[in-house]
Each structure stands twice: as C-alpha cells, then as structure tokens.
Amino acid sequence: MSDLLARIDGGERIAGVDEVGRGPLAGPVVAAAVILPRPIDGLADSKALSAAKRERLCAQITAEALVGIGAASVREIDSLNILQATLLAMRRAVARLPETPTLAMVDGNQNPGLGLRTELVIKGDALVPEISAASIVAKVVRDRLMTRLARRYPHYGWHSNAGYGSALHRDAMASVGVTAHHRQSFAPLRNWLEDPEKAHNVVRAMNA
C-alpha cells in the first residue's frame, strides 16, 4: 500500500482529519483520519450527501485508503469538555492510521496537537478530498453506533436524530429520563437535571 501513496504532491503523505458529533446531546464524538492513495470520485462534505451515498463511499474509502478511527466517550466529554474531547478523538484517529502521515490537514480552526506538521482548513470537509473522506467515515461510523444504541433505548429516536436534540429526543428525556449515554455537562441536560421535579427521572443504563 505504501507504494501507492503517490497521490500526495511532492511525496507528502497527507492525512485528512475530521470529526462528527460535537453538537448532540447523547453519544460519543467520533473522528477519522484518511490517507488517500488515489482519488475517489464523489467525495464531499458528509452533510451534503445522502445516507446511501455516504455508506457507499465509506465502503470504498475503507477498502482503498488508509483509515484511522478514534472516539471520545460521553464520560470523557463530560470530564474534559467537548472541544478537548474532540481533539482527543482526532489524536486517537491519527494514531490508529497504519502509516504515519507527513502532513495532517484538519477541518476547522483548532489544532489537535498531533505531533506532526498540521494545516487547519476552515470548511475543509468541502474543500480537501482527504478531509471529505474523513468526514464521511466518521459520520457513517457514528451513525451506525447511534443506530445500535437506539435498539437498546428506542424512546429517543437516535436511529434518525443521531443523538441531536430533536423534539422527539427532548420529549423522551422529559418522559423517560436520561441515560448514561447522555452528555450531562451540556447545558440542556445540566439545566434539566438541576430541576428538582425532573432530576429523579434518570435512567441508570446498565453496562454502558
């Protein structure tokens, strides 16, 4: 595979890095790092693609590219804060690449401290193919995880809202309670749990 890394200009081995899941009320934040040995048609910001197209591209990326995936748990999000947990997930993703990149191109304006040369690219998931690929992989991986969790906790609609604060999700929090997969440091949950009339209504998830 190393011989195929000539896609990178000037012999550079570029890894695109992106995350998914900073905003939801539940679930981990997931990051991916991708080195593309060759161009892949159809790459774009994962948010601009249908679920079916993301799945197809994710399968192609994981088959043809070098991929590392990292995550930070809800417990880490609550203890570190979401920004630091996101940067941790990015570091884990890059560390799990099978090849060490010479350059990381990271979506956004926050340097995750990867220990290698890094360029920050605002809206990079729509501009840099490697970052687009990373955004697709991270989105598919996280969506699959939330769909699995939805089978165990069906009230919250996580299979469709991926843990974001949809009306269905918030209504279920009010009527059923919250789980160990909810981010209790986030203001909507923190305020909700501080309400004495609601704080008793907490689901203690087993084996979370």
Image (tube, rainbow, N blue to C red):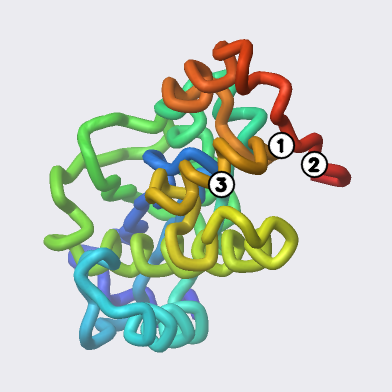
Q: In the image, is residue 44 above or below residue 26?
A: below
3D distance between C-alphas at marks 1 and 3: 14 Å
Decide if residue 23 is on the left or right side of residue 72. left
Residue bearing mark 3: 172
Where residue 188 sits: x, y (%)?
Answer: 44, 26
Can see residue 84? no
Residue bearing mark 1: 180
Task: Categorize mark 1 by other alpha carbons within 10 Å: few (<14), some (14-19), many (20+).
Answer: some
Task: Categorize mark 2 by other alpha carbons within 10 Å: few (<14), some (14-19), many (20+).
Answer: few
Element assignment for label 3 = helix
Element assignment for label 2 = loop
Pointers 2 and 1 in contact (CB under 8 A)?
A: yes
Q: Specify which label sits upstream in the sequence, 2 or 1.
A: 1
In which quadrant will I find the C terminus? Answer: top right
**74 or 136, which lies in front?**
74
Q: Specify which label sits upstream in the sequence, 1 or 3.
A: 3
Residue type for callout 2? Ala
